[in-house]
Amino acid sequence: MNAEDEIARSLHEVPELVAHAIAPVPPSRAENASHAKELLKHRATIHAQERLVFSLRADLAARSQATARSEDQRRALAGELADLRARLDEVEKEAARAEQRATRARDVAARADSDKDVSVRRGQDALRRFEQRHARELEGLKREFVTAIVERDGALAESSPS
């Protein structure tokens, strides 16, 4: 039996006890004494029930207040939970975007490395070709220079009276 049912039952018993307590008193003294004892007994019962009703009402009020506070806290926490879930969703989306940016950056870096390697190879090839061409030209120039010196020395030797 819950507290409300017990309060309702106690409230229904009170009028019966009051009516019984104020019933007409029998005329004899012996009966009067017995009736007085019975009346005091009923009054004590009524007071005990009144105290019980008061106590149950106070308990019900306290429980109602506690329930209301708990419900307010539940609502507040439900709101906070919704906010936290929304924030978590935003953070997860931002993390996904950051991962995409990092992946793109890694791809760009890999392409840049590849381009750098290709550029270095091309530069080295161009340098090798340049050095080969100039080495051939230098060899040709050296031969021309030696030939020119030999021809000059030969022309000088022919023109000088020995």
Image (spheres, grey):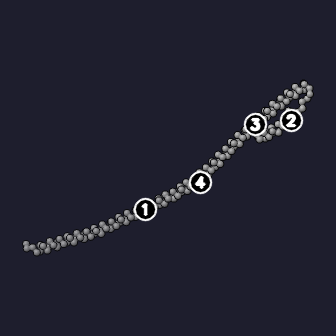
Residue sticking out furthest to the top: 30
Q: Residue at x 28, y 68 (%)?
A: 134
Classify 10 Å Cα crowding around label 2: few (below 14), some (14-19), many (20 and above). Answer: few
Residue 65 shown left or right of residue 153 in the figure? right
Residue at x 40%, y 62% (from the top left corner)? 116
C-alpha gap between disc 1 and disc 3: 85 Å
Residue 69 or 105: which is nearer the viewer?
A: 69
The kind of residue on which mark 4 rests is Ala
The one of 63 and 140 positioned closer to us in this rendering:
63
Q: How far apart are marks 1 and 4 (CA)?
A: 39 Å
Q: Residue at the far left: name it.
A: 162
Disc 3 designates what residue?
54
How far apart are the two marked residues, 4 and 3, measured between alpha carbons? 48 Å
Q: Which of marks 1 and 4 is nearer the N terminus?
A: 4
Q: Which of marks 4 and 3 is in front?
A: 3
Residue linked to disc 4: 86
Above or below 55: residue 94: below
- Residue under circle 2? 19
Residue 63, given in percent of the width and then of the height, sits at 71, 41
Question: What numbered label is drawn on residue 57?
Answer: none
Instruction: Report if residue 1 is visible in the image.
Output: no
Q: Are marks 1 and 3 in contact (CB under 8 Å)?
A: no
Q: Which of marks 2 and 4 is nearer the N terminus?
A: 2
